[in-house]
Amino acid sequence: MIRFDILTLFPGMFESPFQSSLLQKAREKNLVEIHIHDIRAFAADKHRMADDYPYGGGGGMVMKVEPIAKALESIGPLESADGVLRVLLTPQGELFSQEKARELSRRRRLVLVCGHYEGVDERIREHLIDSEISIGDYVLTGGELAAMVVVDAVSRYIPGVLGNEESAASDSFSEGLLEYPQYTRPAVFGEWVVPEVLLSGNHARIERWRRKESLRRTLRRRPDLLARSRLSEEDKILLKEIEAEGKTVQSPESRVTSSQEEDGKAGLD
Ligand SMILES: C[S@@+](CC[C@H](N)C(=O)[O-])C[C@H]1O[C@@H](n2cnc3c(N)ncnc32)[C@H](O)[C@@H]1O
């Protein structure tokens, strides 16, 4: 079970994403608890101003320190509480990854602070936050979409949320590789056929094929990941086979690989 507290100026943005699909089920099963806090409710003045002009001039508005400090206070004594992490969503933070999602899922509680406008008063970063996360090298209007991404990716690691824990283990990035191609019924759709090996019932062959396709796909699309992953002796053999097949220089758009041809199907990347 994990608890998320999200501090935002736009609570309405979270209504639909957290009321659908796996996250809704996870909440119903009490595996994931999500509390949304409206920062504006903690603004002291009568206009409920949570942002103000930047000192030193310049365009845009900056989110004020007091409403966020008070919102954090209202959640409880967080500093000393074991397992709690206060995270600011910001394009300047550590790049979010599958590894980071897994690491965060070990926390009991995550507090996610969503910035907006030009961002937040620097004193929030300095004194109220433990960690800063970016979901990518681009700038969003606000931290809300980033918080949703973090909640979704982290929740997948909470036992019971996925139903089938194996799927998280084989997901792309979990082992430092992209996942192998997946197929479902029908086995034949027009001229497009599922690789024969997947219908063979031979689990050892299927595992080998999946591992090889996972390596092939990572080599083609994300060689940076492959260079960082720990490869077994069997992986090295499979990579040699892939190289020998001489097809790895094809562009990612290329739809048919030699092994897929050998397996008797056209690839569906
Ligand atoms: C328009 S952005 C502010 C960007 C800020 N002026 C800067 O250059 O770093 C407003 C808010 O959106 C959120 N945000 C924008 N891009 C993000 C990203 N890539 N990852 C996480 N949060 C992001 C942050 O909470 C940020 O405070």
Image (tube, helix red, strand yellow):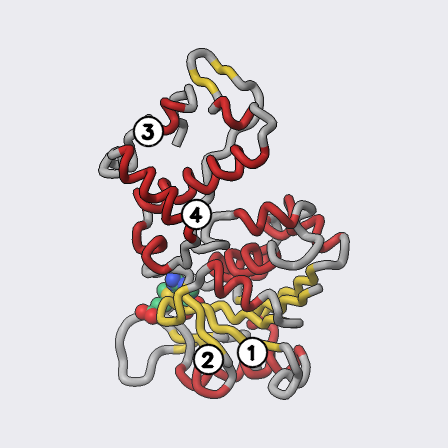
Left or right: 120 in relation to 184: left
Identify the residue at image location x=30%, y=42%.
220
Q: Earlier in the sequence, mark 3 or mark 1?
A: 1
Q: Position of residue 92 (x, y in %)?
A: 35, 71
Judged by depth in the image, the label closer to the viewer, 3 or 1, is 3
| Label 3 sits on residue | 257
| Label 2 sits on residue | 64
Q: Earlier in the sequence, mark 1 or mark 4?
A: 1
Identify the residue at image location x=43%, y=54%.
232
Answer with the quadrant where ligand 1 appears in the image: bottom left
Can residue 243 be seen here? The reply is yes
Judged by depth in the image, the label closer to the viewer, 2 or 3, is 3
Cα–Cα span, label 1 and label 4: 60 Å
- Residue type indicated by callout 3: Thr
Judged by depth in the image, the label closer to the viewer, 3 or 4, is 4
Q: Quick one: 157 or 166, which is closer to the camera?
A: 166
Disc number placed over residue 43 in the picture, else none: 1
Identify the residue at image location x=71%, y=48%.
25
Disc number placed over residue 181 in the picture, else none: none
| Label 4 sits on residue | 234
